Image (cartoon, rainbow, N blue to C red):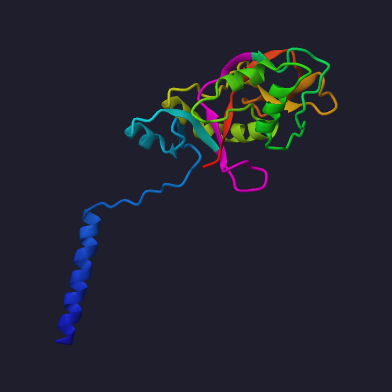
Amino acid sequence: MLRCNYFCLFSLVLSVALASCDGHHEIIDTSMQVGHVLCTDGRVMPFEECERLDKEPIAVVFHLGYDEKTEGKGYAVYLRDLSNEAFADSVGVAQGTSADLYAHDGNANTYEMYACNGCGSPAANAVFAMWRYGQSAYIPSVAQMRLLYVAKPYINHIIERCGGEPLPDEADEVWYWTSTEVSGQETSKAWLYSLGSGAVQETPKLQSHKVRPVVTLND
């Protein structure tokens, strides 16, 4: 009798296990990952889920970090470039960025560029003008552009699937403004960053170059 009970119990467990397998109950990882998309409602999800729910993507996650350098939970890059703009409309004025090549402070830098009383910043103005959906876009710092460069091979196909402009490889298209002024030359130069090679180049602020805005993920 005892042997029969054990056999019946084993059969019941096996039947339940097989039924579960037949039901294909897939466990979905809902944690935020590089390559997920930021939607207009502020939610972050895989592109396939965004498409299934008929949501509008506006940016792609390119960095996640829970260290003291990373703001919020990480960063997402917008789907398109802004047109060429100058870092400043005049020279002779330090615009108040940290000039730190290793700080993740693009958000604070962009605000300082925008709020500077000594001169205007067409690049910062262009970024402030695009703010929508509660997302505060900004010009990434040199350190944040490094993170974007590293992530480029993993996110470009997602940017394309979202209908955006992939980060370029062509030599004459890869240079972007950062929001970091050149230390010791803050009144006249800021850093350009190449998304083709990872190089930086100190550049007169009056020159016009592209901006690829990013956003901090806080939720």
Q: Can the viewer see residue 172 in this picture?
A: yes
Which residue is located at x 74 percent, y 34 percent? 101
* Residue bounds of the magenta highlight: 63-84
The image position of residue 26, as x and y in percent, is 31, 51
Q: Residue furthest bottom?
A: 1
**Nearer to the camera, 30 or 17:** 30
Q: Quadrant of residue 141?
A: top right
Q: Residue furthest right?
A: 184
The image position of residue 195, as x and y in percent, is 62, 26
As drawn, is 116 to the left or to the right of 172? Answer: right
Which residue is located at x 59 percent, y 23 percent? 212
- Against 142, residue 203 (above or below) is above
**Nearer to the camera, 8 or 137:** 137
Number of labels in the image equals 0
- Against 205, residue 158 (above or below) is below
The image position of residue 213, as x and y in percent, is 59, 26
Q: Decide whether residue 75 is among the magenta residues.
A: yes
Q: Decide whether residue 171 is among the magenta residues.
A: no
Q: Quadrant of residue 48?
A: top left
**Nearer to the camera, 27 or 218:** 218
Q: Can the viewer see residue 192 in this picture?
A: no
Which residue is located at x 69 percent, y 32 percent? 108
As drawn, is 68 to the left or to the right of 137? Answer: right
As drawn, is 148 to the left or to the right of 89? Answer: left
**Nearer to the camera, 196 or 114:** 114
Q: Quadrant of residue 10?
A: bottom left
Quadrant occupied by the N terminus: bottom left
The image position of residue 113, as x and y in percent, is 71, 23
